[in-house]
Image: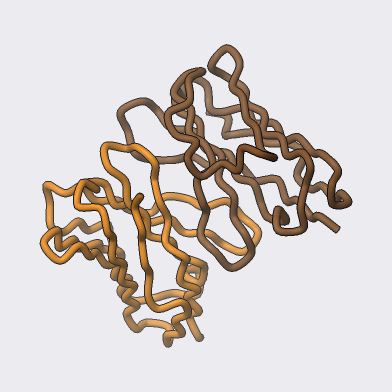
């Protein structure tokens, strides 16, 4: 089955700086790569996703890049704000089947 | 639209007891998932339904866990008998057929003593 590895497990950044989270996946059939944000005590919510037919996608301060050859994808958050503090999960699936999650990255934005 | 509803929100039981969780997905969502999230870890897929059929249950410990989705709408997840390592948040999610986005419920937090 799919194995998704995520790094780092914790990330502390100064407000205004950028944050980068990296994930690798094992199944070359995977073609859908979403990122979920989970605030403390709340449900995970989708913040951005990318499919394998594109290499990069941007939405305001967040962007995701995908390298299918190397089987890795990354989340970039620019101009971080205190409300960006949360746990971020990457995930991967093939044809929307059996979405597998990484272990999560706890991001802390210092004021 | 109303979100994914789950109950109960919290449950504390002794080991070897049984427990059941209920989920009502977003109206019209054909796909329903049960995930187990142990503290400090990412969600782990237990079972995925498409309408009322099982798409994948390869990671469901079938000796103690069971799940059903009658009539392709609501779903229940049962654990019998519970073990200490079953302590986790059980997240239900649903999605529209053909799309990837999962909509999660608030989760049911299980503590096994």
Tell me: A66 left or right of B93.
Answer: left
**Looking at the image, which is closer to me, B57 or A54?**
B57
The location of residue B108, given as percent across then percent down, is 70, 45
Tell me: A39 left or right of B78.
Answer: left
The location of residue A17, given as percent across then percent down, is 34, 83
Identify the residue shown where x is 41% and y is 50%: A46
**Looking at the image, which is closer to me, B55 or B93?**
B55
Colour representing chain B: brown
**Looking at the image, which is closer to me, A72 or B18?**
B18
- Quick one: which residue is furthest to the top in this view? B71
- Quick one: which residue is furthest to the front in this view? B63
Identify the residue shown where x is 62% and y is 22%: B74
Colour convention: by chain
Chain painted orange: A
Work out whether A104 lies above or below A79: above
Tell me: A21 left or right of A9.
Answer: left
């Amino acid at each position: 089955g799919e194995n998704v590895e995520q790094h780092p497990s914790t990330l502390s950044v100064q407000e205004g700086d950028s944050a980068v989270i990296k994930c690798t996946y094992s199944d070359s059939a995977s073609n859908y790569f979403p990122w979920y944000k989970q605030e403390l005590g709340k449900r995970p919510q989708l913040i951005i996703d990318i499919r394998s037919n594109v290499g990069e996608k941007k939405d305001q301060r967040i962007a995701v890049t995908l390298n299918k050859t190397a089987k890795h994808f990354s989340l970039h958050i620019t101009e971080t704000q205190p409300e960006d503090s949360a746990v971020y999960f990457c995930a991967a699936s093939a044809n929307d089947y059996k979405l597998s999650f990484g272990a999560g990255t706890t991001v802390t934005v210092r004021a | 639209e109303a979100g994914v509803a789950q109950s109960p929100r919290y449950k504390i039981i002794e080991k070897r007891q049984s427990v059941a969780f209920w989920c009502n997905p977003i109206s019209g969502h054909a796909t329903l998932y049960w995930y187990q999230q142990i503290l400090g870890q990412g969600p782990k897929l237990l079972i995925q339904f498409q309408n009322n059929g099982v798409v994948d249950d390869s990671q469901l410990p079938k000796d103690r866990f069971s799940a059903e989705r009658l009539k392709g709408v609501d779903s229940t997840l049962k654990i019998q008998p519970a073990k200490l390592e079953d302590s986790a948040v059980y997240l239900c999610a649903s999605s529209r057929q053909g799309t990837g986005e999962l909509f999660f419920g608030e989760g049911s937090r299980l503590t096994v003593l």
